[in-house]
Image: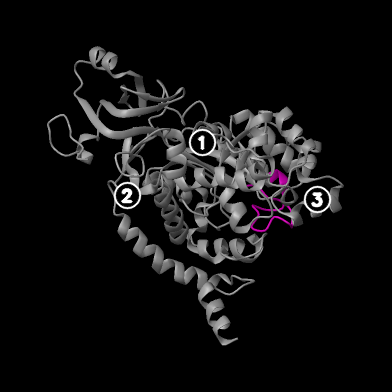
Amino acid sequence: MRHETPTGGPLGPHHLAGGTRLLVPAVVMTPRGPMEEYAAVVADGTFRDVGPAARLEREHPHLVPVRLPGHVLVPGFVDAHHHLTQSFGAALAFGEPSEIFRRVWVPLEGALDEESAYVAAKLSALESLRGGFTTVADAGTRAPVDAAVVAAAAQDAGIRCVLGLVCNDTADGAGACGTDGAAVLAAAERHLARFGGAELVHPSLAVSVPEAATAGTLRGTARLAAEAGAVVQIHVNEHLAAVERSLVRHGLRPLEYLREVGALGPQLLAAHATLVTPAELTLLADTGAAVSYNPVASAWKGNAVAPATTMAERGIRFGLGTDGTRGDAFRLVEAAEFAQRLAYGLATGDSSCGAGWSWLERGGPGGADAVGLGALTGRIAPGAAADFLLVDVSGPEMRPSWDLPWELVRRGNRDQITAVFVAGVLRMWRGRAVGWDDRALVRRAAELAEEVVARAGVTRAHPTSTQARARSALR
């Protein structure tokens, strides 16, 4: 289908850039579901108005409607758990057993300098934008650079970022801020104040795992984040080894320990939470803590799949995260449904497993709520930030169409994303960055990655796939 503009020519990025715009797509994905013959007015980085197209055209006669036949206006996806500075080593984790952070991620990030950390983070942001994410929650870098480096990469790429500061203060917290709890909390307070007024960067705090911080620091970061309206990101109940260490050390599972020290509450964003007991689900529900459900990470390097459908039934807040696996939002929501079906639905005869719409909800507004930005983004509604996608549904993947939410979850793909907007600004057009040279970035990243990995001293438990194939051929 040829997409026409008000003047009759083919749709181009110049039709969507700048000023106040009245967008009239085929469908708008509203908080009430998909609505046909709807439109949205975008101005000053927000949705000024959303409603029936006839009404908006009547009430805004000075605006020339930008008609977008064959397109759905979708809220931008939120990646509720990412590690932006790990992009140089993404494939190094393939085929590796769980708990690889000490062997791969700590040495890799430790080998980054200011330029390579910036390029690695911007490369992650580019992939995320291409994949339909308008917000990413970065769980804090262990690179020996200022957090402003990662903030600059996110801002320059044009993605919204919940920027974590690692607040580890024990010997277990590899790559820690330091061992002085008071100094760590002072740095945390400065971080929250420093980025509190930034347009695209929203500060948060992070602790790698509960054992990486003292009880006082866990309690202190929870207090500071709650006062600032921010979140504390902690990897919780992700791997068997971590659960066992907590039981041996404290006689409590990680979530139970966080409750005991006063760090469990609405400010907590618990990454993974795959190994949770019924009692721990009750803790999450009763305290209002949020979870990042990371299904691709479970498949690639995990010990279990978080019981997300049960969490939804219990009223537990959760979004979807990539854990830096791949920045593709449509594949993430499909993985979220797929993992639940394999891990839980098949065993119980649950053929719906969230009915499609659930995963779109958790990928957008649910994720925004989990990362502390529920009042700002994740939905197409008046007053919300204009973080959205234009998705082409005119192709064979979506025609004929019978159930758009299900189809987006199971058949949607990155190639259908025509445009990505963050804060009302066009950031991506047909998979390419707008306003900066994304190909030059990729070339530079390839150069720097070789240098960084060479000096990082990464230890792999298994050979690469090509090495494994060669060994197999020799048997």
Give residue 25's position: percent from left, percent from top.
29, 29
Report if residue 140 is visible in the image. no
Please name whichever residue, 309 or 325, is drawn nearer the observer in this view of the structure. 309
Q: Tell me if mark 2 has few (under 14), some (14-19) or many (20+) residues whose alpha carbon lies within 10 angstroms of its own.
A: many
Q: Residue at x 56, y 51 (%)?
A: 296
Q: Amino acid at mark 2?
A: Gly
Please name whichever residue, 441 or 460, is drawn nearer the observer in this view of the structure. 460
Rendered-image quadrant of the N terminus: top left
Q: Which residue is mark 3?
A: 246
- Separation of disc 3 and disc 1 at Cα? 36 Å
Magenta: main secondary structure: loop
Q: Amino acid at mark 3?
A: Ser
Q: Amino acid at mark 1?
A: Gly
Which numbered tag is attached to residue 109? none
- Separation of disc 3 and disc 2 at Cα? 44 Å
Which numbered tag is attached to residue 431? 2
Which numbered tag is attached to residue 356? 1
Q: Tell me if mark 3 has few (under 14), some (14-19) or many (20+) residues whose alpha carbon lies within 10 angstroms of its own.
A: some
Q: Is residue 437 left or right of residue 254?
A: left
Between circles 3 and 2, the one closer to the viewer is: 2
Q: Choose top left, top right, bottom left or bottom right for residue 353.
A: top right
